[in-house]
Amino acid sequence: KMVWKLVFQLMLMFQVAAAAAPIARSGCPDRCGDISIPYPFGIRKDCYMNEWFAIECNASVNPARAFISRINMEVLNISAERATATVKSPIISSNCTGREDGVPLNLTGTPFVFSRYDNVFIAVGCNTQALMTGITPNLIGCVSTCSDVKSKNFCEALLPSSLQVFNPRIEATDDNQDREGCKLAFLVNHTWFESNVSDPFSLQSRDYVPAELGWAMNVNADDPVYCRGYYNESFRSECECDGGYEGSPDLGCIDVDECKESKHSCRGLLKCVNTRGYFNCEINKLYIALIATSIESLPTRKRKREMECALVKKSAICKEEGTKGKAMVPCLR
């Protein structure tokens, strides 16, 4: 009985593995250590959508570490379904003994933004004001007051739409109290913060916290892809293949051959010719040749009218040159 149970479990595992959809382009590695690398990201050339989504995998350490090359941010997780990447977000500090200050971030000009719905702005310290700079005309920040319970000396603020710059200014609100005290500011995944941090001051021993990046697909005008940006649980662009194409914008849109699949409206003497994203109806040259051969033995004037009729697709009227100009006469049946 145990043997059959084991066989059944193995068969089930194989079926699940076979049914799982590929997350990377064919022939491309889909992991860097413990981290899945789904398209539009990729590790090798021709495996990512464009240079912004290139992943550098440092396999010289254990476990391997993945970085979004162009913005030099370390990746902790990527979800293609939610269009978010969990990255190491720096902690900016002021007057904190024994720690190096984090480096501000500027993602301007990239397809990445800090997810408005997944992240929150946190400032830690007694009588501390933290404002995010470089995002005019918006004014985003918060003020933390002093409390007898040290773990409550923090404040938070919601993020604006499409935030790409994180360069907070931290300062004391009271010149006579805690001016030199340790103060922190950071962007963090709010679910992680609520679940893992009971005392925000404990984060001064960390270099980073996890935050979520959203991204928008940047497609060329000639690509058969339609995208619309929107906000749901994160910032992303929903894209689909144009009409006349099938497949996925992530892994490629393939032209539908309407002629082979009988999805055209060409009838009679018209032949279907497939084009990118559509089809054309053209006069079948074979039929023209047959018609020309069949009327070759007709008298010259009659042959001329018949040829003109054939070329206008069996029109009931033909042109005939007369001695006093052009006249319209019925075609020969």
Image (tube, rainbow, N blue to C red):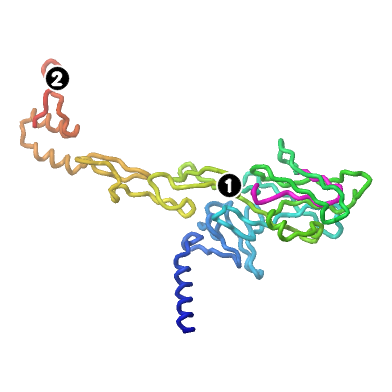
Magenta-drawn stretch contains 123 = yes
Left or right: 75 as drawn, with respect to 151: left
Q: Residue at x 84, y 45 (%)?
A: 171
Amino acid identity at mark 1? Asn
The answer to which of 234 and 272 lies nearer the viewer is 234
Q: Residue lying furthest front in this view? A: 1
Closest to the observer: 139 or 72?
139
Residue 109 lies in the magenta stretch: no
- Relative height, residue 329 to residue 42 (above, below): above
Tell me if 259 is positioned left or right of 181 in this view.
left
Measured as percent of width and height from the top left, residue 59 is found at 62, 67
First of labels 2, 1 by sequence position: 1
| Residue that mark 2 sits on | 327
**Across the whole image, how many numbered discs are drawn on residues?**
2
Q: Position of residue 304 (x, y in %)?
A: 12, 30
Residue 156 locus on image (x, y percent): 75, 48
Q: Quadrant of residue 206?
A: bottom right
Residue at the image position 14 percent from the left and 19 percent from the top: 327
- Marking on residue 323: none
Q: Nearer the viewer, residue 152 or 307?
A: 152
Amino acid type at circle 2 is Ala
Q: Which residues are magenta?
A: 115-131
User: Which residue is under mark 1?
Assistant: 232
How far across and down, in percent of the image, does residue 86 sit?
Answer: 64, 57
